[in-house]
Image (tube, helix red, strand yellow):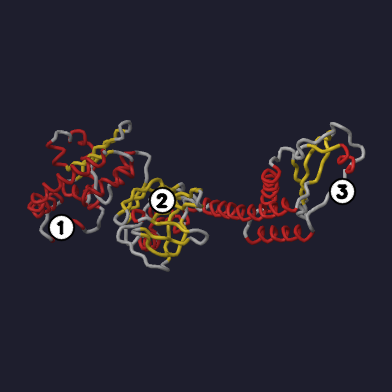
Amino acid sequence: MAKANKNTKSDSQELLDALTILEKEKNVSKDALLDAIEKSLLNACDNHFGTSENIRVVMNRETCEYHVYADKEVVEEVFDPAIEISVADARMQDPSMNLGDICQVEVQSKEFGRIATQNAKNVILQKIREEEKKSIVDYFKDKEHTIITGIVQRYVGNNLSVNLGRADAILTRNEMIPGENFKPTDRVRVYVIEVRDTPKGAKILVSRTHPDFVRCLFEEEVSEIREGIVEIKNIAREPGSRTKMAVWSNDADVDPVGACVGKEGNRVNDVVAELGGEKIDIINWDINPAILIQNALSPAKVISVIADEEEKKAKVVVPDYQLSLAIGKEGQNARLAARLTGYKIDIKSETQARESGEFDQFGEAYDDYEDGYEDDFDDISGFEDDLDEEGFIDMDSLEESDAEETEDAEESEIEAEDSAADTANEETES
């Protein structure tokens, strides 16, 4: 076979230099580029010669020198020059060639060389874009379910364009905490929900209202969570208003609530500050659903809970004076407790439970509640003396006094409480 001509050393060196720079500066794989260039040379053959079926590209990946060969059949008379070669021409390259042999002929054409060079440039540019896009997608894929910091660029309608360094994201209005306002150049922390690979590049979905935004903030603040000692079991959140978080400790010597609150509340306060003052209730998670529901309704006191684990429904009785607190403003406390526990919660006051005939189910629990209620006061040193000084003989007289002082207020609020209870119960059942 005759010695093949090759592309000039300068062309090869320029290509090699370009690929080396791209690999270092753009983080684009040199091998991936060479694969694409080889493919582009075959495409150039298709365009120039009308076929690439009998074409073979040989490239030296160390020097970027390449040769393009066409396999042609040796024939007596040539009808298709793209796939055939005469005996005489074949023997000029290799004297041993005979009719029917396959002769490898290097493709030599200035026009083809120009097309090949342009194709290589286009491939390099396209591959750069593809590799950069892939690199960005991969980078942010690793950031999914974490918090990252960006710089506010501008508002796009009601949404916020945020620069995250290697890409931009849109923080939509419904993913912002109600009442939040940002201005250009502000630093903003966002939770990365998901990263999607689209034809236009990485689409990064971010949020400040997602429950896991709170989870990640506590992971940053609480070393016991990062170390796996304390677990966040679940979070229910109404952004900008209130969050309930259930926690559990894998170490009996570590109080999970105390660990999350921190000394003098420093840990939880840092989270609250990031959330713009959003209230956070941290409760103990429990495998017993009745105890979990009771904890979830905190800060309200609960007389008893009857939980149906199969139906995921619970009946709760609270003291009359705790009904409003248990339900919460516009049903929020009950609603968040339902989301946190996964139970539909029906809350009734003691009076409502008695009137409906359901209280008998809670009788034993109520006795325990009353005993515990009085024991709480008995444990306070000097409390009985203080009662006597104030004119109260015992706990019963104190309760009677409380009832008299609050009777008028309760009568004026009972309609509102019933309405709120109905609303909360409807929402927990939806």
Q: Does dot 2 land on a helix, a strand or a loop? A: helix
Left or right relative to 220: residue 302: left
Q: Mark 3 = which residue?
A: 3
Left or right relative to 189: residue 425: left
The amino acid on which the numbered mark 1 sits, given as a three-letter code, is Leu
* Coordinates of residue 179 in the picture (x, y in percent): 30, 61
Kindly report the distance in space between the C-alpha atoms of the residues bearing marks 3 and 2. Answer: 67 Å
Q: Mark 2 = which residue?
A: 212
Answer whether labels 1 and 2 touch (C-beta < 8 Å): no
Left or right relative to 394: residue 295: right
Q: Mark 1 = which residue?
A: 387
Q: Quadrant of the C terminus?
A: top left
Rendered view: 410 above or below 184: above
Front residue of this view, candidates 229 and 338? 338
Q: Does dot 3 land on a helix, a strand or a loop? A: loop
* Coordinates of residue 160 in the picture (x, y in percent): 38, 60
